[in-house]
Amino acid sequence: MGSRSGGVADHQLGRQDRRRRRFAVHLVDTAWGTTFWGQRYGDWDEVEPPRATATAGNPAQELDFLRFCSDELLACYRAERDVLREHSSAPVTTNFMTTNCKSVDYWRWGREVDVVANDHYLTAEADRNHIDLAMSADLTRAVAGGRPRMLMEHSTGAVNWQPRNIAKRPGELARNSLAHVARGADAVMFFQWRASRFGAEKFHSAMLPHSGTGSRVWRDVVRLGADLGSLAELRGSLVRADVAVVWDWESWWAMELAWRPSVDLDYRERVAAFYEQLWDAHLTCDFVAPGQDLAGYRLVVAPSLYLTAPGTAAVFGRYVRDGGTLVVSYFSGIVDDNDAVHPGGHPGALREVLGLEVEEFLPLRAGERVSLTGGATGDVWAEDVRPHGAETVLEYADGPAAGKPAVTRHRLGGGSAWYLSTRLRGDDLAGVLRGAYRDAGVEPADLPRDVEVVRRHGPDAEYLFVLNHTDVDTRIEASGTELLTGGRCDGLLTVPAGAVAVLRTG
C-alpha cells in the first residue's frame, strides 16, 4: 500500500508541476502579447532569450531580457559582496557610470553598495562639457539617496579611448574635481596613478605622467591634494534642491527598441537638453526615480518617460494637485511595464494630469522644422493634441499640426502640468521653462553664463562653491571664509577665470 500511494503522490506532483508550467506560459503570453504574429508558447521549455530574427522581435520580451541581464549582473555583485563581508568589515562598492551605462538600472544598485562610487570621463571635445559632468554628479548623488559618495575614476588630462586625446587645460583638473565635490562627492580619485609605458592605455593621462614630477599635471595633482585637505570639514554635508528631473533606465531601454515611431527619439538627448536649461538657470537639480515621492520639490521635469506605470502617473497627479509644477515632454506616458500601449489613447497614463489627448503622432522628416507662435521652432516630432482642460500656451504655426496646440498648461488642484509636444532646444526650450518657473515660484539666479554656483549644507555651516568655467574673472555677492585660501570675503567675491572658490557662509 505504501508503495502504491507513493506512486500516486508522484503522479499528482507531476500534474501540479505541469499545471504550474502551463500557468507560467500563460503569464508569459499575456505579458509579452504573443498573440501578435502568432508567437504563443506551448511549453515553458520554448521560452528562450531573444534570438536573431528576420525582422523585429518581440519588444516586450526584449525589454524583459534587458531587465534580466541587469538583475543577473546585480546578483553576481551581491554574491561577491557577501563573500567579502564574511571575511572583512571593510565597506564594499563597485564603480558605476551613471549617465553613460544604459544597460544597468542603478536605482536598484544604489541600495546594494556600502558607498556609491562613480566613474566620469569628460567628453573632451564637447562644447560646455562641464554641464554633462554636473548631470552625472547629480544623478550619482540621487542614486546614493543623497548620502555622501565618491568619485572613483576621472582623468587628470587626456582620455586615450576617445576619438581625440584632448588634454585638459591649466586649472581644468581642479575645476572638474571640485565640481564633483560641490555636488556631493566626499572623495575624489583618478585613473591612473602612474602612466603605463605599454598596453592599451599607455596614452591615457595619469597622476604621475610620462614626463614625471617636473610636469604641470603633477604640480596640479599635488595642489589638488592640498586643496581637498583644506575642505575636510565639508565631509558629510549635503546638497539640497528645489527641482527634480525624472530618470528611468527602463524607459531608456524600452523607448530605443526597434520600430518606434521615429529613429530620432533619443532618451538621453532629451534629458540632457532639459538639464542644460536648468543648469543655465543656475538651479540645482536632484534626479528621482519613477514613482518616488515628490513632496518638497517645487518643480519636477519628466523629459522622456515613454514607459509610465499607473502608480507613477498617480504620484504625478497627487504632486500637481498638492501644488507642484510638472513639466512633461513628448512621447511620455505611452506604455505600461510590459511595453503595452495604455488603453484609451495617448499619452496613456498621463492624460488626466496633463488634461489632453494626443490623437496622432506626427513625426517629422529628417531636417524638417516647424514654427510655433511666439517665434519658437521645433523639430523631430509633432502631435495632434486635443486639450481636455489644458490651455494652449503655444500653437503650431505651420507643419502637419498647424493650428493645433504645441505647448499646453493644465491647472489641476493647486498646481499645474505643462506639456511640450515637439522638440524644443536652447532659447526656445528656456522660454517655455520660464513659464513653469513662474508657476513653481522658482527664481533662476542672475549670474553670468557658465559660472556654476552650488551649495552644500552641514549641521553648523553652509558652503558655497563658485566654479568659473569662463575665460574672464567673475564677481558675485557673497560673504564668508574662503576655504582654499583662508581669506575673508565681505560682500563681493572675485573668482578668476577658470578658478574655483569655496566659502563657508554660515
Image (cartoon, grey):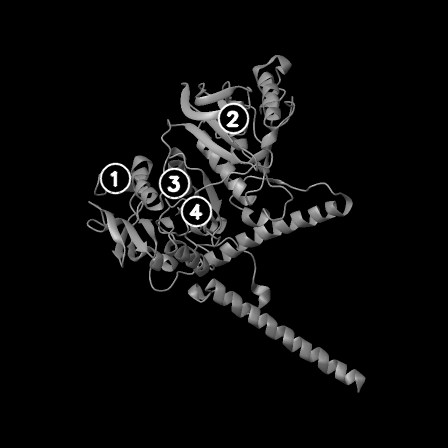
Residue 492 at x, y percent in the picture: 42, 22
Q: Secondary structure at mark 4?
A: loop
Label 3 or label 1, whichever comes before in sequence order: 3
| Image depth: mark 4 or mark 3 in front | 4
Local crowd size for mark 4, using a 10 Å CA cut-off: few (<14), some (14–19), many (≥20) = some
Label 4 or label 3, whichever comes before in sequence order: 3
Q: Left or right of 315: which side holds 237?
A: right
Residue carrying label 1: 376
Residue type at mark 3 is Phe
Mark 3–mark 2 Cα distance, whole angstroms, equals 27 Å
| Image depth: mark 3 or mark 2 in front | 2
Q: Secondary structure at mark 1?
A: loop
Residue type at mark 1 is Ala
Local crowd size for mark 2, using a 10 Å CA cut-off: few (<14), some (14–19), many (≥20) = many
Image height check: is 309 above or below 286?
Answer: below
Which numbered circle lies on residue 274? 3
Would you identify the image quadrant in which residue 350 lies?
bottom left
Q: In which quadrant is the N terminus drawn?
A: bottom right
Residue 357 at x, y percent in the picture: 30, 58
Question: In terms of depth relative to the viewer, which is nearer, 422 or 475?
Answer: 475
Label 2 or label 4, whichever comes before in sequence order: 4
Residue carrying label 2: 502
Q: Secondary structure at mark 2?
A: strand
Mark 4–mark 3 Cα distance, whole angstroms, equals 16 Å
| Image depth: mark 2 or mark 1 in front | 2
Question: In terms of depth relative to the viewer, which is nearer, 130 or 439?
Answer: 439
For the question of whether residue 166 can be seen, the reply is: no
In the picture as drawn, the residue positioned furthest to the right comes out as 2
Image height check: is 54 above or below 185?
Answer: below
Residue carrying label 4: 297
